[in-house]
Image (tube, rainbow, N blue to C red):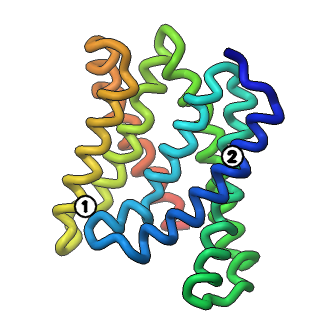
Amino acid sequence: MRIDHRTVALAAVTGGLLLGSLDFVWIKWVPYPFAELGNSTATWAVAAFAFGWWVRSGPVRAALGAAALLVVAVPSYYLTATLLQGDDLAVVWAPTSLLWMAFGVLAGVVFGIGGTWARRAGPRQTVGTALPAAVFFEEAARFVGREGAAWNVAIDVALGVLAVLLVGRSNRQRALGFAVAVPVAAVIFVGFALAAGS
């Protein structure tokens, strides 16, 4: 069933408001190490992927909707922080927030389209299936070597495996998804390293 533009737009805004606010609540009240999932770039990327998966058709609508979802989630997060613990409201339009929104546009486009690809046949389906796992595996790699982060590594790897099992429609697709997820994770890892160093 084709989802109309107004439904996509409403879902993007509503989803962004929920993602940002619930993410802050999760970080504040869920105990470690699970609280780290709220602080996770992978979690937000997979939310964009799920949006694209839901849209099903139209990579442009999926990309725009997923990007809008992540952009709206950023001020929603900081507004929730203001309401629940009295943080300064000015952080909503601070340079850091604007940078996270810019990253949200990039991640929304890539993972929103990836969500639609996972429903298609051929090589794009394999890449789409691999994306959620890749972003969790990449995050796990960033935790490796940090003191006391063994649980974070285990959780991210487990979520990456679970993502492929849920998204893949056949054992062959899942196997290909795992095979592609590792090099894609390496590309994302290098991208984060370059962004951090710039």
Picture residue at 81% right of the left edge, 31% below the top? 5
Determine if residue 29 is in view.
yes
In this view, 83 is above or below 3: below
Q: Quadrant of residue 144?
A: bottom left
The circle drawn on residue 50 is none
Which secondary structure lies at badge 1? helix
Count of marks, rendered view? 2
Residue named by callout 2: 67
User: Which amino acid lies under the numbered mark 1 shown in the image of this protein?
Assistant: Asn
Quadrant housing the C terminus: bottom right
The picture places residue 97, in percent across and down from the top left corner, at 67, 71
Picture residue at 47% right of the left edge, 57% below the top? 41
Q: Find the distance from the CA under tag 1 to the CA under tag 2.
A: 27 Å
User: Which amino acid lies under the numbered mark 2 shown in the image of this protein?
Assistant: Ala
Residue named by callout 1: 152
The picture places residue 52, in percent across and down from the top left corner, at 60, 32
User: Is the residue marked by circle 1 packed among few (<14), some (14-19), or many (20+) residues within 10 Å?
Assistant: many
* Of the pair 194 and 189, the residue shown nearer to us: 189
The picture places residue 71, in percent across and down from the top left corner, at 69, 56
In this view, 144 is above or below 148: above
User: Is the residue marked by circle 2 packed among few (<14), some (14-19), or many (20+) residues within 10 Å?
Assistant: many
Picture residue at 40% right of the left edge, 36% below the top? 184
* Of the pair 24 and 61, the residue shown nearer to us: 24
